[in-house]
Amino acid sequence: MLPEYGIKTLDDVNVSGKRVFVRVDINSPIDPATKRILDDSRIREHTEQTIRELVSKRAKVVVLAHQGRKGDPDFTSLREHAEVMGRILGKPVRFVDDIFGSKAKAAIEALSEGEVLLLENVRMWDGETKSASAEQHAKSELVQNLAPYVDVFVVDAFAAAHRAHASLVGFMPVAKHVVAGRVLEKELRALARVRAKPERPCVYILGGAKAEDAADISEAVLSQGIADYVLTGGLVANLFLAAKGYDLGEPNMKVLEEKGFLQLLPRFKEVLNRFSGKIILPVDLAIDVGGKRSEIGVDQLPTQYLIKDVGSRTLDEYEKVIAGARSLVMNGPMGVFEVEEFATGTKRVFEAIARSKAFSVIGGGHTIAAAAKFGYTNKVSHVSTGGGALMEFLSKGTLPVIEELKRYSK
């Protein structure tokens, strides 16, 4: 049981011999040319934490999942996902190229205890992403066809929990038992420690190129007394600096313009003014001069060169703040970590987090990729599977699927 949320877990239900439907998020990076899986991290997480337990308890496991969106390069079948899942599990995982038709039903009926079946990509059915309530989704083709087979419905897809799609919430009104899986349970327990009742000081570190939500998240965690400080890097820092009145120079302002970020400046200025002293901006920056790192103070702006990292003096200050923290959240790298010259900021922040005594959470695709590249994945307390879902949860304290789970957990 997750008492903070009133949500039941696998500890609260007997799954032996039962048909257990598990909605996971194994949406993985795909090579657009070969359609092959490039990284199996999410598949491994769900397989090792939730599916393996269900197999050991002799459940008949039916897995629901998506991959990409229709029209996107990463939209493809889940056949290879089943093969990867089987290798991780150490036993075959059946796959059927059907979602709720006769082939899917026959495969479900043929399941023996301890076996696993992965159905086809649920987004191949157009009704999956339709905007509707849980009760409306319960009347859909997907749920009406599969509901008779569902003894237990397990929600394990934290990374997709910001979207109340049919396969995520539609089974909740009709299933006998609705519980959280181990991945979702682990996420919610970890995030409670950095949002509900964080140990103080609590520090949020926001960076990266996806800066559009940074002002809202900063306002949410600072206004509610969740975070004590917000450290900034990447385009998040550039936006706040521009909002403070700094001219970053033509090439850097052009980057913000091309991403549609200039229209956000009034919002960033409003939040910065409201929380002056709490949102900490870089005092120096690393610029790209012919492929080499050169550092300038913000008082030397504007610059004709692209800003690609925070500077050394900034990092000295950030390290002091991180060292004193007891709760830490990092979303987004400090700079262009993919290039060695400009990986310094991200590396030093990770090293400071690793040295700290804080409970630390990192999330977002680029943050996790950077942590893996530099060997810090196992040096933080929790690596979140969520990107957009993590940011929305940190901002609002809940997600649409979590709210439905609170209603229907039984």
Image (cartoon, rainbow, N blue to C red):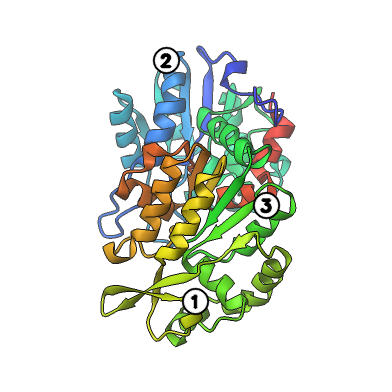
Q: Identify the residue position indicated by label 2 in the image.
A: 56
Circle 1 residue: 298
Residue 62 horizontal/vertical position (percent): 47, 28
Kindly indicate whether the residue at mark 2 contacts the one at mark 1 (C-beta within 8 angstroms).
Answer: no
**Residue name at image x 62 percent, y 61 percent:** 279
Q: Nearer the viewer, residue 293 or 94?
A: 293
Q: CA distance from mark 3 to mark 1?
A: 26 Å
Task: Determine whether the residue tagged by mark 1 lies in a helix, strand or loop.
Answer: helix
Q: CA distance from mark 1 to mark 2?
A: 58 Å
Q: Which residue is drawn at the image coordinates 66% and 61% (left, top)?
A: 216
Give the residue number, with chain letter if any, for mark 3.
221
Q: Nearer the viewer, mark 3 or mark 1?
A: 1
- Residue displayed at 65% across by 22% down: 1
Task: Locate residue 74 relative to residue 144 in the image: left or right.
Answer: left
Q: What is the crowding at mark 3: few (fewer than 14 residues within 10 Å), some, or many (at least 20)? A: many
The answer to whether 273 appears left or right of 43 in the picture is right
50 or 281, which lies in front? 281
Closer-to-camera residue (74/320): 320
Q: Amino acid at mark 3?
A: Val
